[in-house]
Amino acid sequence: MRFWRLPLDAEHHSIPRGEVHIIDNRCKGCGFCVEFCPNGCLRESKRFNVKGYHPPEMVYGAEEDCGDCGLCSLICPEFAIYTQLKEAKKITEDDIQKVTTRYSRKDRRYAKKR
Amino acid sequence: MKVRYRALHPFDKEAEERHIQEDHGLHPYDEYLKPGRIPHIWCPGCGLGIVVTAFIEAMKQKNVPVAQSAVVSGIGCTGRVAGYLDMDTYHTTHGRAIPFATGLALVRQDLIVTVFSGDGDLFAIGGNHLIHAARRNVNLKVICVNNFNYGMTGGQVAPTTPIDARTSTTPFGNAEPSFNLPHLAHAAGAVYVARWTTYHARQLVHSISQAFDKKGFTFVEVVAPCPTGFGRPNKLGSGLDEMRHYREVCEVRNGADPSEVEIRLREKIIVGTFVDVERPDFMEHYQSLVVARAQAKAKSKGKGKAA
Ligand SMILES: Cc1ncc(C[n+]2csc(CCOP(=O)(O)OP(=O)(O)O)c2C)c(N)n1
Ligand code: SF4
Ligand SMILES: [Mg+2]
């Protein structure tokens, strides 16, 4: 779906951009953050940590997608991941289109798994 | 056979401390955790860490100072929470978290006393303490992590194990009906009763912070995955599979009748805030009925002597 114009109150809102910090060596590989990130920003990496688990990493190209919702830090049982607000971005027409693509990528990811 | 001894090195305390310092403070929640205790002992996929995070997050949201918070827990995997939180914590004997916490809550009324313990600890060996603390409406915030078994001792059957579920002591399936914890807490007199799963992390944070605001006995049940003790014998898969299961089967029904929220194996789990009522707490009754009368009596006696 394409939006044909910016919302009228776009100036009064901003898009939070988060930065994900992963403490590799605390991870026990439960996969909660990978599964439940609402924007599908994370995936299991190929590398090992000192315990022999695969810590999560950002999906290639998803650095812009983290909205600093903080669900990963809340749902991580190991205190191994957290987010920080990087910037509060002004809304532009591009962003409005991107929201739809972001969700469609997540849907594709689901479609593949099932 | 020749036994070779390893050369003994004196324990390098400084290096150990340096290591702890380096590792501590990497995460924003670390300020609520005792230095050097993370990683914790809980299994990969265990939900206990999420409950601790939710508790810390609720403290942050409500601006509860660390100096004003006390956590009491019993024995079990859940009981170890007391060892990880960096505040006044009390790791008591099995089942006796509530008696210790009751004493603390009555003597130090400025503290927010949280009881953080497992289903076996609170409802098996400590069942009587819980119902009487709820009846008296002692000002306690109880968080009960329900993993349907005795996790720490090897997955034995607990009073919360659903009927027909397999555990290490019920290999053919549990023949006993289980407790419905919210119903029990409500019937015993708790003023706030809620149930969430670890999948509902945000709602759990909200419920715990609501409980902080309430005066009296509050009870929050958290259904948590235990892949080691309960998941394996019942073929529920990993912790992640159990979380996915919660996502699929849970139904949020705030204000539901607690008598209708029983949990059965692999069936719908009803979550939500079930009870939120007001009732004078123990101290209020005690002040008005006992302390006030005793003071009045002492006064009249004193007068008599003076005259
Ligand atoms: C008096 C006494 N009896 C028995 C035990 C053994 N024991 C240790 S932990 C535990 C069960 C704990 O179950 P629960 O409270 O559900 O905690 P979980 O490990 O499941 O989190 C038992 C029976 C004990 N430590 N002390
Ligand atoms: S035995 Fe169960 S409750 Fe205990 S740490 Fe492991 S998964 Fe968690
Ligand atoms: Mg248990």
Image: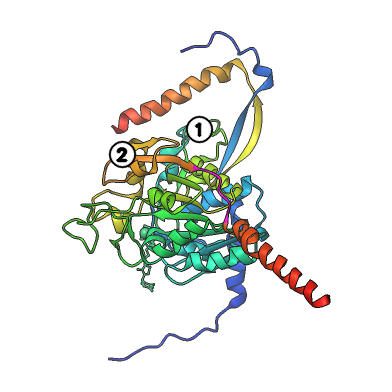
Say what amino acid the circle numbered 2 marks: Lys
Q: Chain of mark 1?
A: A
Q: Is residue B223 above or below residue A109?
A: below
Q: Residue at x 42, y 54 (%)?
A: B145
User: Residue B56: within the magenta?
Assistant: no
Q: Provide the secondary structure element on which disc 1 rests.
A: loop
Q: Where ligand 3 lies, by quadrant?
A: bottom left
* Disc 2 C-beta below 8 A from ligand 3: no
Would residue B150 appear left or right of B88 to someone viewing this image? left
Looking at the picture, tell me which residue is in the foreground, A70 or B155. Answer: B155
Is residue B258 visible in this depiction of the protein?
A: yes
Residue stretch rendered in magenta on the structure: B276-281
Q: Which mark is residue A32?
A: none
Q: Which mark is residue A62?
A: 1
* Quarter of the image where the C terminus of chain B is located: bottom right
> At x 49% / y 86%, what residue is drawn?
B8
Q: Residues within 10 Å of mark 1 (few under 14, many from 20)?
A: few
Image vertical order of residue B30 relative to residue B303, above or below = above
Q: What residue is shown with label 2?
A: B268
Q: Residue B58, position in %: x, y?
A: 58, 47
Residue B194 point in image, percent of width and height: 46, 45
Count the labels in the image: 2
Q: Closer to the camera: disc 1 or disc 2?
A: 2
Image height check: is B76 above or below B51?
below
Is residue A20 toward the left or the right of residue B117 in the image?
right
Asked if residue B33 is positioned above or below residue A22 in the image, the reply reads below
Q: Amino acid at mark 1?
A: Ala
